[in-house]
Image (cartoon, rainbow, N blue to C red):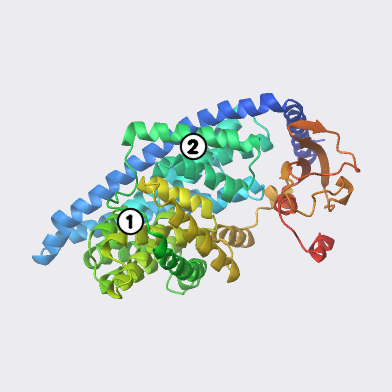
Amino acid sequence: MQPDSSKTDKSSSSTAFNRQLLQTYIALDNWHKFRLRLFVEGIFVGILGGLAISLFRFLLGEAEKYRIFLYNTYIIPGFSAGDFKPLLFWLAILAIAGLALYGMGRYAPEAGGSGIPQVKGVILGVMRMRWIRILWVKILAGAVGIGAGLSLGREGPSIQIGAVAAQGMSRLLGRTRMEERYLITSGASAGLAAAFNAPLAGMMFALEELHRNFSGAVLLPTMTSAITATIVTRFFFGTNTSFTITHLVPVPANHLGYVVILAIASGFAGIFFNWGLLNISKFYNLPIFRNNFMKIAFALLSACFLGFTLPDVLGGGNFLVDKLAEYPYTLSMILLLFVGKYIFTLISYGCGVPGGFFLPLLVIGALLGAAEGRVMVMMGLITDIYIPNIVIIGMVSLFAASVRSPITGTLLILEMTGDFGHLMSLALASAVAYIVAELLHGEPIYDSLLKRSLASHPDKKAEEQRTIVEVPIASGSILENKPLSRVPHLKQTVVVNVKREGQNMIPDPETVLKAGDFIYILTAAKNAERLQKLGEEQLPKDHIRKI
């Protein structure tokens, strides 16, 4: 009689989970040593992530140089002279690139798009990533797609590359799921830091947008990985900032009203950008796009056409931002670039190839700022000397409105420009744009993309996994000054530990929770997001009863 394989699998899974649970209890009981271990592991995550992202940046840079060289040396001069051979050669290259992107997309669908929603899903425990597949596909496919001219950024791929590098290290070392989430967060931090030479922004993005938790356990590895990854990438690429914007002067106090006006406009623009990104799928659902290859081919052919008509909108757009700050573009040209970059970013992202919209979003914000700055100059409100300031204010305010991470946006632009003299105006613009987007009831773009992905491709196996969730008790939350017995009960949920000022407390039902406490809850992965929100939000009573 053959043994029941399903019972064997369940028994093996239960044994593995019990072993992970025991390791988690040991870590919670030895909190000081556990945090020191995370600190050291963050260094190795930064090294691995920095090396992987350096390879990605190198391949991407070579691909973009090759494209620009072909266009300027052979394709455009040949086309002007009636010689179509260079153009046909380039179209053949694009066809091969499209087939390669299509094949890699089928092999590793989790590597498609930005990668940031996938990382958020893994940290929440509702998605899974096959780290080996994603690692090499994201590096190669990202370089091919962006190098071919698609309006995509390197930051999303870099964040996912850093995250899967950390996940791979965690799996090889046999770490628990709780510890793995900390390491994945630190890997994402290393990714953004290495992509833009911006360690502070990388650390803050991982904390503010991905993990949404500032406990010492997540702060230490996140900080060390971001710094280490930046050191690694600076060894290969130097210390130059992402943008080269000179002649930045502090914005005077009597011009801050114009900053507010620009931020309000960016708040509306952020909602519009998110709407376009979330609805471009309707365009690609037209009958003409019978499969994903047709979508990729359309995006690549659009890039080829724009290479002749509007080449500044191709690729991520670093150099376009520098031009906007230095050269007096006409208002009509700025508006044309704005419309072209916006539409082409939607086309590029919607086709599903690996690549983010982080950098294109900043470029669109810079174009919005340049347009408003030019109007203000024409009206005599400001002089040309403040155009560079208006450009970077447009970037940070559109980012804050779309992503809803104002602190990250402010730090990112400061580090990308290398000038901290305009901190006040950037912080003001971020705050105003954030508030406008909130008043318009817009949802953060990465949250929306994650929900859409889960709705279309629910990962039942991931949701059924058991995990331990760290829930910080924020000041003013519904759990502050409440006993543990008042924590809303979910099915398959047990409080296993409470920490106060780094000390363990027995999770007695009468234990009163204080702001700054951390409770550790054993639960099904599908409950993780709701539990985390309980500790940080003032939820209405009817919502609590529903839970």
Q: Nearer the viewer, residue 514 or 288?
A: 514
Q: Which residue is mark 2?
A: 226
Q: Residues within 10 Å of mark 2 (few under 14, many from 20)?
A: many
Asked whether disc 1 touches disc 2, contact meaning CB atoms under 8 Å apart, the reply is no
Left or right: where 390 falls relative to 396: left
Residue 410: x and y, percent? 47, 52
Residue 318: x and y, percent? 32, 53
- Quadrant location, the N terminus: top right
Residue 241: x and y, percent? 34, 44
- Quadrant location, the C terminus: bottom right
- Mark 1 and mark 2 lie on one chain; the one further toward the N terminus is 2
- Image quadrant where residue 498 sits: top right
User: How far apart are the two marked residues, 1 and 2, measured between alpha carbons?
Assistant: 24 Å
- Residue 411 - label: none
Q: Amino acid at mark 2?
A: Ala
Q: Nearer the viewer, residue 182 or 398?
A: 398
Q: Residue at x 50, y 50 (%)?
A: 408
Judged from this view, the residue extending furthest toward the front is 254
Q: Is residue 165 above or below residue 426?
A: above
Q: Is residue 487 above or below residue 237?
A: below
Badge 2 element: helix
- Whether residue 474 is visible to the viewer of this picture, yes or no, is yes
Q: Residue at x 58, y 49 (%)?
A: 208
- Whether residue 161 is visible to the viewer of this picture, yes or no, is no
Q: Amino acid at mark 1?
A: Gly
Left or right: where 166 falls relative to 507: left
- Image quadrant where residue 184 sits: top right
Q: Which residue is mark 1?
A: 317
